[in-house]
Amino acid sequence: MPRYFAAIVIVSALSASSSVLSATPQDTVRFEPTVAQPTFAVREPVLRVRPGTVLVSRTMFGPYYTEAGGAFPGEVGPIYVEGATTNDMLVVKILRIRPNHPIAASQIYADFGGLATDSKVRLLNDPIPPRRYIWRLDRERMTGRTELPDSRVKSIEIELKPMLGRVAVAPRGQEAFAGLWPGDFGGNMDAQEVREGTTVYLPIFHDGAYFYFGDGHARQGEGEVAGTGLETSMDVILQLDLIRGKRIDWPRLEDADYIMVAGSGRPLIDAFRLAHVELIEWLGEYGFGKWDAYALLSQVAESSVANIVDPAYTVVAKFPKRYLPR
Amino acid sequence: MPRYFAAIVIVSALSASSSVLSATPQDTVRFEPTVAQPTFAVREPVLRVRPGTVLVSRTMFGPYYTEAGGAFPGEVGPIYVEGATTNDMLVVKILRIRPNHPIAASQIYADFGGLATDSKVRLLNDPIPPRRYIWRLDRERMTGRTELPDSRVKSIEIELKPMLGRVAVAPRGQEAFAGLWPGDFGGNMDAQEVREGTTVYLPIFHDGAYFYFGDGHARQGEGEVAGTGLETSMDVILQLDLIRGKRIDWPRLEDADYIMVAGSGRPLIDAFRLAHVELIEWLGEYGFGKWDAYALLSQVAESSVANIVDPAYTVVAKFPKRYLPR
Amino acid sequence: MPRYFAAIVIVSALSASSSVLSATPQDTVRFEPTVAQPTFAVREPVLRVRPGTVLVSRTMFGPYYTEAGGAFPGEVGPIYVEGATTNDMLVVKILRIRPNHPIAASQIYADFGGLATDSKVRLLNDPIPPRRYIWRLDRERMTGRTELPDSRVKSIEIELKPMLGRVAVAPRGQEAFAGLWPGDFGGNMDAQEVREGTTVYLPIFHDGAYFYFGDGHARQGEGEVAGTGLETSMDVILQLDLIRGKRIDWPRLEDADYIMVAGSGRPLIDAFRLAHVELIEWLGEYGFGKWDAYALLSQVAESSVANIVDPAYTVVAKFPKRYLPR
Amino acid sequence: MPRYFAAIVIVSALSASSSVLSATPQDTVRFEPTVAQPTFAVREPVLRVRPGTVLVSRTMFGPYYTEAGGAFPGEVGPIYVEGATTNDMLVVKILRIRPNHPIAASQIYADFGGLATDSKVRLLNDPIPPRRYIWRLDRERMTGRTELPDSRVKSIEIELKPMLGRVAVAPRGQEAFAGLWPGDFGGNMDAQEVREGTTVYLPIFHDGAYFYFGDGHARQGEGEVAGTGLETSMDVILQLDLIRGKRIDWPRLEDADYIMVAGSGRPLIDAFRLAHVELIEWLGEYGFGKWDAYALLSQVAESSVANIVDPAYTVVAKFPKRYLPR
């Protein structure tokens, strides 16, 4: 994992928090975010970068991540990628995601969550009680520990697997979606696969792409069933690039082992189908016939249910790269 | 994997196909099935075994598995487990599942499948064209190869990962479900996790349990999206046992790494929630408080969508055993 | 088999139903049911009738309908229709459905219902409290009154609109579905439209059809949201007939104003789509092109959500007869 | 119906299309819209009115409604209601909705529609063919006629039942939803019940409410299954008022016969449940206990599936006013 970091040699002195900053010649930019955004939308960029830029930055910090708790701070962005057009595909290489804060918080909500009634899944049952868990992070050993107030075992320690809940471009048209939304623009997909070593490909709906990121999870289970991961602040290193003349409809991901499509929608089956149908279309680019690809997915597809809590659910459909033609 | 087989040394000479057969003293029974069943239901048992019996048998063979194709042969069973009551839990240890036939077949159907319209998901679009793929199995190397008529690459070889699509008890009451159905009785869950090394725990709705098995897949992707795996005939070795005085509502699975619950239902989100809520109840047996378990699942749960094609969909919710208290 | 027939006295000259009844004297059979069936399935018929027979009968009575409450009594049937084949369509004209008991019961369940968690819709919330309501029926005025223990107004009176929750044939193959299930065989559709003046057309999966009926509701809301209507015992007069050489896939209904299809499935959208796609196919029989029919439904379709509580949900799609070509 | 119009005698000379316009003393304002909005969002109001104002206006016109076809023109609004706060409820009395154009258009789309695959319901089937139907409106007789190119009967005439697909306030926070979206802010509910004689109550998320309307349908079936109604331009008369100190979560409707809640969401069952649970809460305001109301809905609820095509589906749950306490 840390291999990528070696590639980032020089981080130039930066005029840090200023709102617009061109990439330095070596294409490495350190950006200290100062403004948190409540929606994914076209708005005045906080930064402008050239394609290929390595971005050394961090997610927004706020009371949400403290012991006391508080409001979610919002996203970093939008970052305008110079020369990006709606005919291109945005490439986001995730070089590094690491917690930079000694605690993480997770929660259970009375009105948000996947295994209980919430504001979108209304039933007549009484709501469940809210809870908040503070996790002490050991960033050397990459573990987190929390107390379990109601359990026979009084605390538990788990390994950290840092990821970003949200990477996005501005959505199509004049729409503005709150940070909780995932969609064809990426957004709050809450996919574990958005981690170090993964490249995320995003469609571009507006010239400049208007890239956003945020929502660090030191660890998160599949489905993010209670509505949060180990929410904490993250140092991130991302490389932003373009593939020109390439249009996609939904976010694609790639790591050492898989090509993947992240489909978001409700109901869950629609997200599942969308991700897999788009994956079959991607396999077509590798020379697989549509029906052959369908038949093959029935034998080798893997998938993860990324979230079942957000306004749209997200499913990641995966095809093992070892079965791709050379 | 083959480790288990070593444990089964002596298989006594058996009067094979007769309809009722007591367990031999060493509790190993070889059973050659001759009758294929079209439903999971209470009916005259084909075999009676004592708890603890190791069953050396095979799935039913039929034209379905041949190059020409034909009807699905149905299930083996019911096997009556002596002394099993509705207060007990049936334990099915999967010691061995291996293809015993040189080919496997997979299909695409016009009226059955997860990524296209079918008889339950009716839309106005024209149906997709049916297809049949024959896979040549190399049972030494444990690989299968098929031709891809519409693709640039003309054939593909994949590793085999044998599993049983169906393990079941007779469902509650007087219901009789066709072999395509999964449910709380197990049935056609089409879960990859039903493989060598896994133990399946099933509820018992009728004294004697009335155990069924069948539907060997030499390999199957998550979701079984086109409606079939590599369908072929299997040699199986199963140990059937009871845990007395233990009642469960839905099938549980356990392997070296996970405790798991297989929930089946439609829509997909209901299967997903059911599996996870039942898993939280199981975690309660390990001393986790309900809300602690919910909060913890949000960080460490894994899951697989076993099938999205059967009359009920199946989701397997998983909790890593390394986080269970010792 | 014909031994049951002895129990059937011939009832001529029916004062019977006000509405419309054209049966000839010799085609009228009074049947007093004595056996309640727990499943829809092929089994020994309780009655054999000729096509065209007017059946004067009643639903099964049991403690379920009493003040004290108790188990549901099950269905009346199967009734074997002489000469019915799988190439024919069963015609069930509903001539009369009237409560024959002074009370009806409705319930709220902790584990069954559409607006709360239940055994199929599992969430972590606490279950809701069970409740039972006794309704006093005024069969002259056709009204029912119950007490509302938790409300400012202490009782409420509503008009009765009697219907049958269940009309069915034996399902295909060797399947046996408990009485709660609706499906392509009809069954527990819980559709208000199954009332006096409606004709129900059912597919036939076995020679003889094996017709069942039961589950009288003196009144029921759309969706049957809490899981019951005003459950009570009913006198019924049904005419059973055949249309030969006509095969259908799903139950059709017809009354003075609409042709209708009842689609059952989960999720709800699948039931909705299935009912409407089948209705478009029916419109094809009237000479509407498929796309014209689709476009037209978008302007004139009506529908009712019959139930959202049963193992499959039911939606009735309706096309106004005044827009059918003469 | 036309009774309402008589009440609006004097429409003062208005500076019509100007962007901000105070209500005249008699509280009747004629507003000629000139700007069409692509999203429901907080933006500069096109009009400011006092509570109680009767608004005489029309929906936006554009090529969408012509024989040739073209882009949808967008919504009228936002209209700022003076004094409206987030503690109040917006009251929209629909006094008149009448087509003002001689034709209406309806369509079938390859990528949008409820009974076929579309951009959100992706499957592998080939898409359906797009179609466009022109309906000639007879505004005297209130009928529309179109040709049916594929049918035995060559044209069809249906009665008009004018309605507005969209009435909305600006959604919460900084979100901006394209005009296709319904939600708790109202929006594109496509509910037939939004017609003359109905009062719509909307929550207010921003001071001033920011009211929008548009999307006239001369007729529309339940579900709007193919994605359009008889789309045409409408004259509308709406009275905008406030109920102060009253907060609601979801749109409520009321006409002579019913109190109603319009719930929007996906999957369909979630919209259905949400509408009914909110209706039970409303019934609480009339003195019905929660469980009594649930039990009662199971007997007397009616509902309509308003749309199954928009980004969220809409269900209208209805309670007959004759069962409300006096």
Image: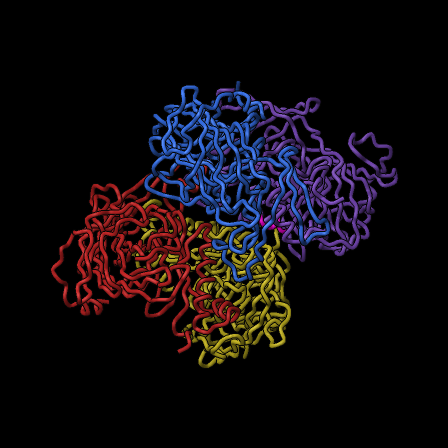
Chain colours: A red, B yellow, C purple, D blue
Number of residue marks: 0
Farthest residue toward the left?
A13
Q: In this view, does D111 lie to the left or right of C54?
A: left
Picture quadrant where residue D240 is located: top left
Give percent across and percent down for residue B288: 33, 48
**Foreground residue, B83 or A48?**
A48
Q: Is residue A208 visible?
A: yes
- For the C terminus of chain A, the image quarter is bottom left
Picture quadrant where residue B291 is located: top left
Which residue is pictured at 58% across the width and 43% down the height?
D104
Which residue is pictured at 46% across the width and 70% down the height?
A284
Give percent across and percent down for residue A314: 40, 54
Which residue is pictured at 28% across the width and 54% down the height?
A213
Q: In this view, does D6 lie to the left or right of C86?
A: left
Q: Is residue D272 visible?
A: no
Give percent across and percent down for residue D282: 46, 28
- For the N terminus of chain A, the image quarter is bottom left
Give percent across and percent down for residue A281: 46, 66
The relative height of residue D51 versus residue A116 in the rendered view (above or below) is above
User: In the rendered structure, does residue C56 fall within the stretch colored magenta?
Assistant: no
**Foreground residue, A240 or D14?**
D14
| Main secondary structure of the magenta stretch | helix
User: In the rendered structure, does residue C275 fall within the stretch colored magenta?
Assistant: yes
The magenta segment is C273-277
Picture quadrant where residue D28 is located: top left
